[in-house]
Image (spheres, rainbow, N blue to C red):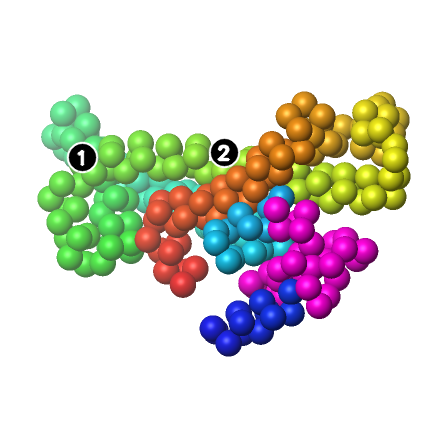
């Protein structure tokens, strides 16, 4: 692995930027080796940390992985809720002989069977066995936890999509500015022009080039951080990603 990284580093400057062919590369993507010019590297390529450049295509793949893991999590949550409903129905009828109190108790204990089952699946027999004792409380805690996780997961999907769009707009901005050298940015971003509605161009006009680059670079970091957050929701996601 180290030799591959050294080889990739040695190629920097010998090839053109993958997205800006007229510019020399100053770094290469650590995943696929695509060249990154100075603008690409400063704007988002260095977002993965010191010495860890990442191209747009590989960043996009990271977002796809985040999305796939969230989809898997949502399917697991649906299964958990299905088991809770099945357990609640069974518990209700089992406890029916004890009157209203028995039905309520059976409903509550039955619903917690979903938590017990998923405890076995996620943590193994030892922890799953402990959950049998504390399952009613665990059911409530886990249910609330899952609601919060799904809400956060939806926010991550929205965040990742917004950052990717800003990266796409960055490419459109740089290519348009290169093609129209000497033109005023405000003119190129006016209604009906090539950069009208371009997120990155608007950020440059309102905050300046350096601030727009810093914001985009932070977005690349956030995509990587989002992946770690998703994998913290369920240990099986981390195991799938390993």
Whether residue 100 appears in magenta in the rendering, the answer is no
Mark number, residue 236: none
In the rendered image, which quarter is residue 173 located in? Answer: top right
Residues 22 and 236: in front is 22
Query: Residue at image x 88%, y 32%?
Result: 183
Q: Quadrant of the C terminus?
A: bottom left
Is 72 in front, or is 100? 72
**Neighbours of disc 1 within 10 Å: few (<14), some (14-19), many (20+):** few
Label drawn at residue 155 = 2
Q: In the rendered structure, which segment of residues is drawn in magenta? A: 13-42
User: Which residue shows up at 11% across the image and 44% down it?
Assistant: 133
* Relative height, residue 190 to residue 96 (above, below): above
Q: Position of residue 61 (x, y in %)?
A: 59, 55
Mark nearer the viewer, 2 or 1: 2
- SS for callout 2: helix
What residue did someone put label 1 on?
137
């Amino acid at each position: 692995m180290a030799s591959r990284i050294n080889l990739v580093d040695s190629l920097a400057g010998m090839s053109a930027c993958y997205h800006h062919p007229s510019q020399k590369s100053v770094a290469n993507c650590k995943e696929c080796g695509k060249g990154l010019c100075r603008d690409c590297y400063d704007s988002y390529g260095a977002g993965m940390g010191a010495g860890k450049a990442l191209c747009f295509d590989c960043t996009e793949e990271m977002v796809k992985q985040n999305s796939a893991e969230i989809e898997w999590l949502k399917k697991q949550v649906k299964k958990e809720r299905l088991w809770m409903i099945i357990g609640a129905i069974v518990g209700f009828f089992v406890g029916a002989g004890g009157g209203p109190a028995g039905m309520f108790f059976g409903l509550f204990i039955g619903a917690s069977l979903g938590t017990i089952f998923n405890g076995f699946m996620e943590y193994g027999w030892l922890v799953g066995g402990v959950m049998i004792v504390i399952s009613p409380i665990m059911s409530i805690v886990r249910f609330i936890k899952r609601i919060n996780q799904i809400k956060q997961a939806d926010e991550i999907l929205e965040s990742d999509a917004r950052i990717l769009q800003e990266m796409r707009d960055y490419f459109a901005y740089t290519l348009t500015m290169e093609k129209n050298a000497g033109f005023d940015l405000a003119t190129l971003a006016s209604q009906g022009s090539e950069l009208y509605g371009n997120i990155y161009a608007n950020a440059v006009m309102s905050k300046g080039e350096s601030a727009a680059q810093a914001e985009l670079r932070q977005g690349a970091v956030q995509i990587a951080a989002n992946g770690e957050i998703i994998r913290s929701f369920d240990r099986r996601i981390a195991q799938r990603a390993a």
